[in-house]
Amino acid sequence: MKASVGGYARATDLQHAIKLLDSADGMARVLAGGQSLVAAMNMRLTAGDLLVDISRLSELRGVTDEGDTIRIGALTRHVEVGDNALIKEHAPLLADAVKFIAHATIRNRGTIGGALAHADPAAEFPACVLALGATLQIMGPDGGRTIAVEDFFLGLFETDLEPEEVLMAITIPKAEAGERQVLQEVTRRSGDYALAGLCLVKRQAGHRLTMLSVGEQPELATGAMAMLDAGNIDGAVAALRAEIDPSSDTNASASYRRHIAGVLLRRAVDQMTGDVR
C-alpha cells in the first residue's frame, strides 16, 4: 500500500515551519525522522496531510550543557542520544534506552522529539523523560512555551502539542550525586516492542517510576513510588500491579503484563542495590 499525502514542503527555518503548519488548518504533519509517520502513512492510518519537513533545521539538533540541566534538541537522532557524553554522564537512562530501540536503521533515522510527539505508549523515550522529570520547549504562532512532561502526554498517541506547534527541545535535570537510573523491559525478540517495561529513577527526594506497554500513555506509578520511598518493596510491587491497566493482545495477556511489571520492579531495585540475583 502506498502513502497518500496532500503535499510536501521543506521548512527553511523554525518560523517557516510554523507558518506552514499554521496555514494548513490542522491538515499538516511534521516530518522529522519519519520512522513512525511514514509507516503510518503507508498503512493509510493517516492520509491527505501536508508534510512539513523540518529534518534540516540545525537549530533543533544537538545537546548542550545549561548548568543544572542539559538541553536536547528535538531533532537529535536516537543514535546521537546513545553516544553523547553529556547524556551518558547526566541522563544515562536515555543513553541506555537507545540499546532497546528497534534496530540500527530506526536508531539512525529516528529523533527523540519525534518519539515524544508520536507518544507511542510502548516506546522507551516517553517513559524515560517522564521518569526523569523533563520539561519540553514548544514553539507556535503565538510564541514559545514550556510544559512539564507530566502534562504533555494526554492519551493514546495524544499530546498537548497543537497542530501548528513544533517541539523544539527537551530539558533534563542533571543527575545528582548518588542518583540511580534503571531501565528494564521484556521483549520476545531483540528489537521488538516491549511486552512490558519500566523506568526507575532514585533521587534524594524519592523515587520516580514509569511503565511502558502497560497502558495508553506513560504515567507515574505514584502508589508504587510511595512504597519504594518507604522501603517497602513488596508493597511497591503490589501497588504497581494494582495501578496499571494493561491490555491483552496476540503477544501477551493483561495478567501476564501485570505479573511482569512486578518482576521488572524487583529486578530494577536489585540492579540499583547491586543485588545480582
Image: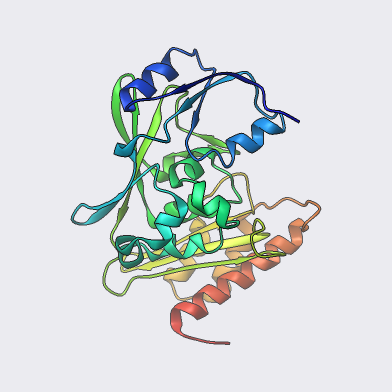
Could you say which quadrant of the image residue 42 lies in?
Answer: top right
Q: Is residue 95 left or right of residue 250?
A: left
Whether residue 136 appears in this view of the structure is no
Q: Residue at x 49, y 79 (%)?
A: 271
Q: Residue at x 46, y 65 (%)?
A: 96
Compare residues 171 and 155 and report the one nearer the observer.
171
Question: Going by the picture, which residue comes out furthest to the right?
Answer: 250
Could you say which quadrant of the image residue 101 lies in?
Answer: bottom right
Q: Is residue 197 left or right of residue 249?
A: left
In what quadrant of the picture does the N terminus appear?
Answer: top right
> What count of labels does the image hold?
0
Q: Residue at x 37, y 53 (%)?
A: 133
Residue 86 in the image: x percent, y percent? 29, 61
Question: Going by the picture, which residue comes out furthest to the left?
Answer: 67
Residue 98 in the image: x percent, y percent? 49, 60
Compare residues 146 and 118 and report the one nearer the observer.
118
Could you say which quadrant of the image residue 266 lies in?
Answer: bottom right
In the rendered view, would you say 59 is above or below 236? above
In the rendered view, would you say 174 is above or below 116? below
In what quadrant of the picture does the C terminus appear?
Answer: bottom right
Q: Residue at x 40, y 56 (%)?
A: 81
Residue 192 in the image: x percent, y percent? 67, 58
Whether residue 101 appears in this view of the structure is yes
In the rendered view, would you say 173 is above or below 37? below
Scheme of image coloration: rainbow
Residue 177 in the image: x percent, y percent? 26, 72
